[in-house]
Image: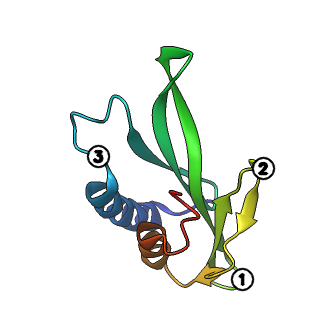
Amino acid sequence: MSFSEIELKRLRRAIDAFLAKRRPEPAIRPKLDMGVRISGGSVEIFEIRPRWTEPSVKHESPVAKATYVVNRKRWKIFWMRSDLKWHGYTPLPEVATLEEFLRAVDRDEFACFFG
């Protein structure tokens, strides 16, 4: 599933607001930054850091993912466990809007997303 241009603009607005709040200060970003990728029907949040063995190479670490389920009109929430696989976020498995997903990630009440 792909989002329409109008839906993408709405999603980008929510994502930009989330990043404005969560990204580190510009001076820190070369060592730790945050990014969001929209791919198909999913939105993935990830951290960006220099690879410790080769600082000139950037490494992305997945943090959270939401996948839109069209027939239910809901977003399913996932988190990356230490086994490097996506797992359903049990405390809040689904939400109605991307904004609710971003709020859950920002709060990180159970330290699943940012540790």
Which numbered marker is on residue 24?
3
Q: Earlier in the sequence, mark 1 or mark 3?
A: 3
Give the residue at mark 1: 71
User: What amino acid does circle 1 point to?
Assistant: Asn
Residue at (42% x, 65% y) in the render: 11
The disc labelled 3 sits on which kind of residue?
Pro
Q: Residue at x 48, y 68 (%)?
A: 105
Q: Secondary structure at mark 2?
A: loop
Q: Secondary structure at mark 1?
A: loop
Q: Is residue 55 above or below residue 111?
A: above
Q: Position of residue 87 (x, y in %)?
A: 74, 64
C-alpha distance separating marks 1 and 3:
37 Å
Q: Which mark is residue 82?
A: none
Question: In the rendered image, which quarter contains the N terminus?
Answer: bottom right
Tell me the residue at 32%/50% (across/down): 23
Label 2 crowd bin: few (<14), some (14–19), many (20+), radius 10 Å: few
Dot 3 surroundings within 10 Å: few (below 14), some, or many (20 or more)? Answer: some
Q: Is residue 80 above or below residue 69?
A: above
Q: In the visual, does 12 lie left or right of 62?
A: left
